[in-house]
Amino acid sequence: MAEKKVQKKLVARAETYDVLRRPIVSEKAAKLSESNGVVFEVAMSATKEDVAKAVEILFGIKPTKINIVITKGKVKTFRGRSTGTQRKVKKAYVSLPKDAKLDLATDM
């Protein structure tokens, strides 16, 4: 008998939406989009596996490579007197296959 290969359907849960916070729009992100790359702000607790699973579930595209960077918050002065720090941001640089197209303006 021929065996059927059953693929598990990936279901989006609340945790999936918590992993990817928002897409980052910048000059570097625009340059990466030319070579099928996307940049997301992700949760501080997110790992590469979490980001890969979230992108696959939400957009239906399996990423080829993921790099994660934490940018430290800058020290800012408010009205010349008090100083404070901006929040830390964790970014995920996601590389997609060459044949994949991801338009964040319509997909999110």
Image (cartoon, rainbow, N blue to C red):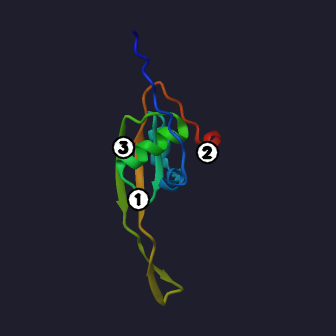
Mark closer to the chain start, 1 or 2 = 1
What percent of the width, then of the height, locates residue 29? 47, 46
What percent of the width, then of the height, locates residue 41? 47, 55
What percent of the width, then of the height, locates residue 3? 40, 15
Q: Which residue is mark 3?
A: 66
**Camera-side residue of 40 and 83:** 40
Amino acid of disc 3: Ile
Above or below 46: residue 59: above
Above or below 39: residue 33: above
Q: CA distance from mark 2 to mark 3?
A: 19 Å
Local packing at callout 1 (Cα closer than 10 Å; few below 14, some 14-19, many 20+) is some
Residue at the image position 47 percent from the left and 88 percent from the top: 82
Quarter of the picture holding the C terminus? top right
Spot the residue most to the bottom.
81
**Camera-side residue of 9 and 16:** 9
Mark closer to the chain start, 2 or 3 = 3
Residue at the image position 47 percent from the left and 54 percent from the top: 19
Q: Which residue is mark 2?
A: 108
Residue at the image position 54 percent from the left and 86 percent from the top: 79
Q: Which residue is mark 1?
A: 90
Quarter of the picture holding the N terminus? top left
Amino acid of disc 2: Met
Local packing at callout 2 (Cα closer than 10 Å; few below 14, some 14-19, many 20+) is few
Amino acid of disc 1: Lys
Local packing at callout 3 (Cα closer than 10 Å; few below 14, some 14-19, many 20+) is some
Spot the residue most to the top.
1
Q: Secondary structure at mark 2?
A: loop
Q: Secondary structure at mark 1?
A: strand
Residue at the image position 41 percent from the left and 71 percent from the top: 74
What percent of the width, then of the height, locates residue 58? 54, 41
Q: CA distance from mark 3 to mark 1?
A: 13 Å
